[in-house]
Image: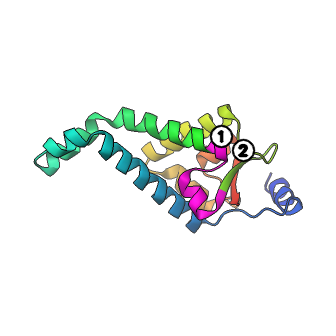
Amino acid sequence: MREDIQELLNREELTLAPIKKRAMAFFIDEMLLSLLLIFALWDSFSSAKTVEAMIQVTNSFVLEYMFMKIVYQAFFVMQYGATIGKIVMKIRVIDIQNLANPNVLVALNRAIFRVISEMLFYLGFLWGMLDPNRQSWHDKTARTLVVNA
C-alpha cells in the first residue's frame, strides 16, 4: 500500500504534510476549542473559586466537549478539507480514493476515531509519527492523508 500511496502522491504532485505542521495545526485547533468551551461556560468558570472547582466544571462537560470536537473536525474537514488550524498551517485532508475533500461519512469517521485516539493517550497520533505515510489511526480508518495545500 505504501508504494501505491507514494506513486499517487508523486503523480498528483502532492507532498505529505510534515509532522511539525500537523502538530501546530493540532495546537491551534485545541486552543480554539478550549477558548470556545471557556466562553460557553464562562458563568460556571467564573464562579469556580479554586483550581479543583475549575477542574470539576471541566470534567462535568467532557461529553459535550468531545461532541463539540467531533462536530468541529467533521464539519471543517468535510466542507473545507481542513480545520482552522490546518488552514493556518496550509495543510489539508484528502480522501485517498478521489483526492478530494472527504465526504460526510469519511469526515465523521475520521473525527470520531481522532477523539478515540486522544482518549487512548494519543497513541494514534504517535502511530502517525512513526508511519511512513504519516497516517494516524483516524487517517487509517477513514483512508485519508494530510498533505500540503
Instruction: Give the residue at x 82% y 59%.
Output: 9
Of the numbered discs 1 and 2, the one sitting upstream in the chain is: 1
Q: Residue 119, how many percent across, how many down? A: 43, 43
Name the residue: 60% across, 40% down: 110
Q: Spot the residue most to the left.
A: 49
Cβ atoms under marks 1 and 2 closer than 8 Å: yes
Q: Main secondary structure of the magenta part?
A: helix
Examine the rendered structure and indicate whether residue 144 appears above or below residue 7.
Answer: above
Q: How is the image coloured?
A: rainbow
Region rendered in magenta: 77-91
33 to 85, vertically: above or below: above
* Residue 54 in sight: yes
**Residue tagged 2:** 101
Q: Disc 2 residue type?
A: Asn
Report the disc number at residue 78. Answer: 1
Q: Position of residue 138 (x, y in %)?
A: 60, 44
Q: Quadrant of residue 44?
A: top left
Quadrant the C terminus occupies: bottom right
| Residue 86 included in the magenta stretch of the image | yes
Number of numbered tags placed on the structure image: 2
Give yes or no for residue 122 being in the magenta stretch.
no
Q: Position of residue 49 (x, y in %)?
A: 10, 47
Please provide percent x and percent y for residue 86.
59, 57
Q: Secondary structure at mark 2?
A: loop
Q: Amino acid at mark 1?
A: Met
Choose top left, top right, bottom left or bottom right for residue 5.
Answer: bottom right
Residue located at (47% from left, 58% from top): 28
Q: Is residue 130 left or right of residue 143?
A: left
In the drawing, does residue 15 fall left or right of residue 121?
Answer: right
Foreground of the two, 128 or 64: 64
Residue 116 visible in the current orientation: no
